[in-house]
Image: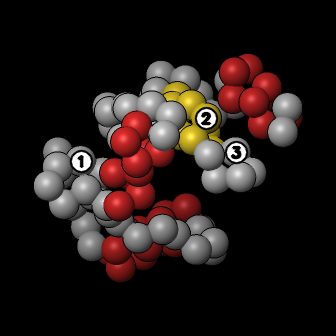
C-alpha cells in the first residue's frame, strides 16, 4: 500500500535524524504479494511453519516465535506490544 515509499537508506536516515535510532534496522521487505519475503512466506503458511495460516493485515502485527524457532501465535495490530497477553507470553518463557 506504499506506506513506506523510501529506500532502506532513506528510512534509516529518517529514523536516525528524527528518533535518534542507533541500533541496526532490518531491511525493508515485502510482506504480501508475489514478491513476499521468505520470512513472511514461512510466517503466514501452515504448510511452511507447521502451525497455522495467517494473513498480514496491517502494520505492527506481531508473530510470537519461541526460543526453538517455532511459531506460537500471531497477534494483530490492535494488540499493543505491552498488552497483558504479550507480556504474559514473554514472562512465561
Secondary structure found at label 3? loop
Query: Residue 85: x percent and y percent?
Result: 69, 21
Other-residue count near label 1 (Cα within 10 Å), few / some / many at <14 / 14–19 / ≥20? some
Residue drawn at (25%, 67%) of the image:
6
Q: Relative to 22, is 72 above or below?
A: above
Q: Based on the displayed image, in which of its 4 quarters is residue 81 positioned? A: top right
Query: What separation in Å lies between label 1 and label 3 (alpha carbons)?
Result: 23 Å
The residue to which callout 2 is attached is 72
**Along the line of sight, which residue is nearer the eye, 59 or 11?**
59
Query: Residue 10: x percent and y percent?
Result: 33, 74
The residue to which callout 1 is attached is 32
Q: Relative to 84, is 82 above or below?
A: below
Q: Are marks 3 and 2 in contact (CB under 8 Å)?
A: yes
Q: Pick whichever of labels 3 and 2 is earlier in the sequence.
A: 3
Image-based side of 63 in relation to 54, left or right: right
Residue 36 seen: yes
Secondary structure found at label 1? loop
Amino acid at each position: 500500500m506504499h506506506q513506506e515509499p523510501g529506500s532502506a537508506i532513506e528510512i534509516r536516515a529518517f529514523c536516525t535524524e528524527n528518533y535518534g535510532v542507533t541500533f541496526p534496522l532490518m531491511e525493508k521487505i515485502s510482506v504480501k504479494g508475489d514478491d513476499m519475503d521468505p520470512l513472511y512466506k514461512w510466517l503466514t503458511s501452515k504448510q511452511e511453519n507447521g502451525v497455522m495460516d495467517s494473513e498480514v493485515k496491517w502494520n505492527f502485527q506481531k508473530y510470537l516465535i519461541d526460543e526453538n524457532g517455532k511459531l506460537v501465535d500471531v497477534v494483530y495490530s490492535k494488540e499493543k506490544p505491552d498488552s497483558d497477553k504479550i507480556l504474559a507470553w514473554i514472562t512465561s518463557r
